[in-house]
Image (cartoon, rainbow, N blue to C red):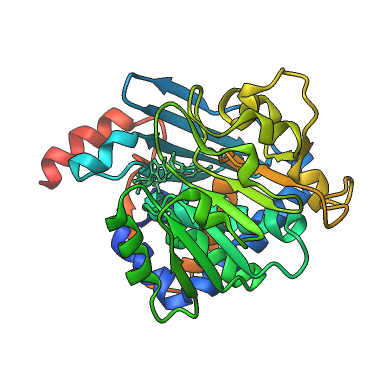
Amino acid sequence: MTAKPPKNINIVPFVSVDNMMKLVLGVGVETFLRELADYIEADFRRWDLFDKTPRIASHSAEGVIELMPTSDGEVYGFKYVNGHPKNFREGLQTVTGFGVLSRVDNGYPVLLSEMTILTALRTAATSALAAKYLAPRGAGCMAIIGNGAQSEFQAMAFKALLGITKLRLYDIDPAAIEKCVRNLAGKGFEIVRCDSAETAVEGAQIITTVTADKQYATILTDNMVGSGIHINAVGGDCPGKTELHKDILLRSDIFVEYPPQTRVEGEIQQLPGDHPVTELWTVIAGEAVGRRDAGQTTLFDSVGFAIEDFSALRYVRDKVASTTFFDRLDMIADPNDPRDLFGMVLRADKAA
Ligand SMILES: NC(=O)c1ccc[n+]([C@@H]2O[C@H](COP(=O)([O-])OP(=O)(O)OC[C@H]3O[C@@H](n4cnc5c(N)ncnc54)[C@H](O)[C@@H]3O)[C@@H](O)[C@H]2O)c1
């Protein structure tokens, strides 16, 4: 006999933008980032279990729309996400997203969630998690180049996971720097506004690049990066969209999420396809060495991988369960007699 399906299996919990904001503030931004990083770390430790594929990208002249699926054999997840650097000039987000988790055993969704805010949180949590293994010991100061939508999340994650409290900010648009300073006021940071990327990196042990430009850009040149620095390169995440001069890559130890995706989308698209890189999960699982010594230049060539979104959805599913921060969506047509889908449609007329 087959197991009886759970009651209300057709009703899917939905975390709206409003509820996501309430959840994040209810949990506390830093606690949320720390707990989310723990979920990502746990999933990176069981990397082998997951279905892995580079994300499916649909490119246009102005941006990209992507689907990012994965499964651990029990739960399946995917994220829809876009990247349109010109959007902010039109008053729109550069990156927006939403995602779904489903049961593998019957395919029924168990969560639908906004993922614009969640993507910023998971990207920042992944960056800080990587830095926990790669940044120089005792790092206290980070430069953030590009002070747009993602930037404060990066700052908060590096504070929550690494205790970074000194920030040096630079953006080509001074209004973005001011917005970032305003949003981070009272959050325990000492902030210096900088008028160039060169000035921003002075004295920083960690450099985060998180700009948006749909072209090969050179946010950092080789002479700007001293030895021993950790670079967290977040903004280069599409074919033809990079932030670092190739010479930096050639003298850095490079850590990536999933090589088949990063070789197409990351900074390393500038290098031959067989250039050595280390998969971040192998460092987290203790199978590879992260930072070896104080003089080493480390680079996390972040592009964003499906498993991080899966971890984020898993975290949100667990976290909202005991709260009221979700709606119940009548999302799955599920007639009492599974073969009577048409009859269910006809009966709706009588019910109306
Ligand atoms: N790696 C990942 O997992 C991941 C996840 C999310 C977003 N991203 C990428 O991160 C980047 C930033 O995203 P966002 O949502 O913050 O974008 P955004 O448009 O809100 O902000 C980008 C900022 O970069 C600034 N900028 C552009 N060129 C610059 C330059 N040469 N020097 C200094 N500043 C410059 C802009 O003025 C803007 O303030 C995007 O490229 C996005 O695709 C990556």
| Residue 18 relative to residue 260: left or right | left
Near-viewer residue (250 or 303): 250
Identified at 77% across, 24% down, the residue is 275
| Residue 14 relative to residue 321: left or right | left
Residue 90: % across, % down: 19, 40
Residue 333: % across, % down: 34, 39
Identified at 32% across, 31% down, the residue is 341
Residue 75: % across, % down: 60, 45
Question: Image height check: is 141 above or below 220?
Answer: below
Q: Could one spot residue 7 in this view of the protein? A: no
Q: How many marks?
A: 0
Q: Could one spot residue 221 in this view of the protein? A: yes
Identified at 54% across, 47% down, the residue is 309
Q: Quadrant of ligand 1?
A: top left
Near-viewer residue (26 or 87): 87
Residue 63, by quadrant, is top left
Residue 200: % across, % down: 51, 56
Identified at 41% across, 82% down, the residue is 186
Question: Image height check: is 18 above or below 285?
Answer: below
| Residue 321 relative to residue 255: left or right | left
Near-viewer residue (220 or 281): 220
Near-viewer residue (52 or 323): 52
The quarter of the rendered structure image containing the N terminus is top right
Residue 303, by quadrant, is top right
